Image: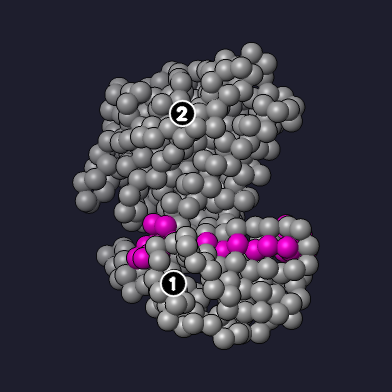
Amino acid sequence: MKILEGKTITDVKGFLANGIYSGVKRSKKLDLCMIYSEYKAKASGTFTQNKAKAAPVTLNQQNIDNENIQAIVVNSGNANACTGENGYNDAVKMTEKVAECLNLKKEEVLVASTGIIGVPLEMDKILPGIEESSKILSADGGENAAKAILTTDTFSKEIAVEFTVGGKVARIAGMAKGSGMIHPNMATMLAFITTDVNISKNLLDKAFKESVASTYNMVSVDGDTSTNDMSIILANGACENEEIISEESADYIEFKKAIEFVNETLAKLIAKDGEGATKLLEVKIKEALTLEDARKCAKSVVSSNLFKCALFGNDANWGRIVCALGYSDANIDMDIIDVFLRNESESIQIVKKGVGINFDEDAAEKLLDSKTVSVVVNLKQGAYEATAWGCDLSFEYVRINGCYRT
């Protein structure tokens, strides 16, 4: 597998995209994105577990099972969430307009929205924007598409890789947005993945959903699970690997590795760009009894607001880590765990057999002042591991969210 520097979702064969300003954002930044496959495509998706689902989520959960999904339209600046029947009808109208412009069925279109909750969509801007967007779809439009889905993000999040399946060179590329309202089990995050691999719908679904469980669902910025979260993959088969991947073969394993890498990279970028974040937090759990126990522990520590505040202050407050492990509901023995702090060059043990030990506080403070900090917990009970990603919680987070709507 090779990372393709500077490539986007439209550097995958058969995919076009763009991003335009339709008039929704007061900032006048790009706010409407369209992704289109020139070939018929299979799709898989995961969606927020919040019961207050936005209209696009409800609509996509119906459309995602169709054999062909060829287009996705995304608006930013307005979430179209908690907008009732009118909001759902507006989401349908977006799919209808895309279908009309691209000669598709409305059921072959997915829609996503992100931004302020509870405000009706300005359809007098959205629908003309879709029409304009459909006319300028381009193989060079991936960069603007990635910019058009952003809200409070400070940078675009993109990744592309190349690998071989069935003797053919294949690609997977992705783009994502997410900065605040981020918590495990999907978060305010959107991710859109394109691939030219020829794969059966059921194996695409299996590989993608398993990957989401170990990547996006292991990210937490602030403990809030959004109303609009979704991740979507489209596979159009344009690389023409002769035999469709229909069983868990060596080609399937390579495909799954590539998806895992793309999704993990985007998940880390979301965590790194947490609202007001000054550093990336990585929590690694080792030697757990089960995978579920490992994930519970990792999520619990990465979601602890108290520890995230300590991280912002470069305070090696190990008690907050142990506390978070204790309420994780995982099957663990608190009397045998070891805890370490790490960065790229150093490792400091701060807990041994469940008890704090003497360590160099100055060295720990310096370590915590790194751009990436890892907390490594050895449960010493089994063979399972899991990793979660997050960030520190800073003064800037409060400032951003104190005036997000007004």
Label 2, secondary structure: give it.
strand
Q: Which label was assigned to residue 71?
A: 2
Which three-letter amino acid code belongs to the residue tagged 1? Answer: Leu
Residue 376, image x and y in percent? 60, 66
Q: Is residue 149 left or right of residue 72?
A: left
Image vertical order of residue 156 relative to residue 286, above or below: above
Q: Is residue 141 left or right of residue 218?
A: left
Which three-letter amino acid code belongs to the residue tagged 2? Answer: Ala
- The span shown in magenta is 272-293
Q: Quadrant of the N terminus?
A: top right
Image vertical order of residue 166 relative to residue 394, above or below: above
User: Local crowd at mark 2 within 10 Å, few (<14), some, or many (≥20)?
Assistant: many
Magenta segment includes 152 = no
Q: Which residue is mark 1?
A: 368
User: Image quarter for residue 16?
Assistant: top left
User: Local crowd at mark 1 within 10 Å, few (<14), some, or many (≥20)?
Assistant: many
